[in-house]
Amino acid sequence: MAECGEFHNFGEYHEDIAGVEEAIAIFNRITPERMNGIPSIGINIHTEGTENYEDTQMDIVSGRVADLEILDYVPEITDNPKAVEVIAELIDKLPDIEVRGSLEKWQAAFLAAEIDQLSYNYDTVQYNQTVEDREAQIANITEDIRNGNTGYLNDFLNALISDSIREGMTDIFGKGTELDDSEGVQTARKAKELLDKLAEYKPLAKIEELEECNYNMIDNVLNNEKPKEEKQAGRISIKEKLAEKKAVIEQRDKSDKEVPEKGTEKKSEREI
């Protein structure tokens, strides 16, 4: 937390803050009457075993603005689930600030990775038999979460809870294992945690921006979708899109060159 976000040696500067609430409390104590600059709350990523000067540090809140769009260029932060979680908590506890951008895409990716890992841990043999490319699997789950297509994920997690609790009860009566320590109950607890995260994830407003024809209809209901035939059935890479565009331009240029001449008089007029 710095009294002057641009030059930290101007005014107060606090490191080793215990948590978000402490950072906000210090931030709110900086009064305009003695301010040397724009106060900020930042985040510092330190990798164990490295020198402090190698840390990644960035201001998240500056004045009354949280610029999350810049995070696209700071993978050291966005690849860190704990860092994204702390930023989300910070934004949530500062409801009066202006937020530019969103953490949505990174939150979806982390949630997808957790669901995939739970699936792998629960039945590794079946997972290896059915999933050929794990990265692609996580990417597909991420896209479904972002698009709100989470019905099958909810079904999977609910089924996992039922099966795991049943296995946990078997452990108790068959082996004398304590309920809270049984593997089945731990799995059920993790599945319930992921269910809650899915329920908290709200991607619909973002999806509306992509799907609604009329921006006056951004109302958390997909009631003004583009016609289905306009949507692409499969995923097309950027390279493929560029190739398609190039082909269209070449065809247009070719058509322009092949326009038939309609008589000498027309040709003369065109040449003039």
Image (cartoon, rainbow, N blue to C red):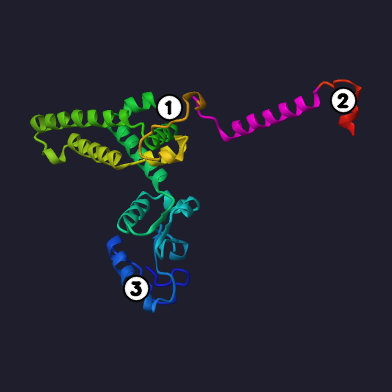
Mark 2 lies on residue: 266
Q: Quadrant of the C terminus?
A: top right
- Does the segment drawn in magenta span residue 258? yes
Q: Earlier in the sequence, mark 3 or mark 1?
A: 3
> Mark 2 belongs to which amino acid?
Lys
Circle 2: element type = helix
Binning the other alpha carbons within 10 Å of mark 1 as few (below 14), some (14 to 19) or many (20 upward) gives few
Q: Which numbered tag is attached to residue 30?
A: 3
Establish if 40 lies above or below 216: below
Picture quarter with the N terminus: bottom left
Residue at image point 47% right, 52% down: 69
Labelled disc at residue 132: 1
At which x and y percent is residue 110? 37, 43
> Spatial distance from mark 2 to mark 3, Cα to Cα?
78 Å
Q: On the image, which quarter does residue 60 sit in? A: bottom left
Query: Does 103 appear above or below 9?
Result: above
> Disc 1 versus disc 2: distance between alpha carbons?
64 Å
Pointer 3 local density, CA inside 10 Å: few below 14, some 14–19, many at least 20: some
Q: Which range is magenta? A: 233-259
- Count of all numbered marks drawn on residues in the image: 3
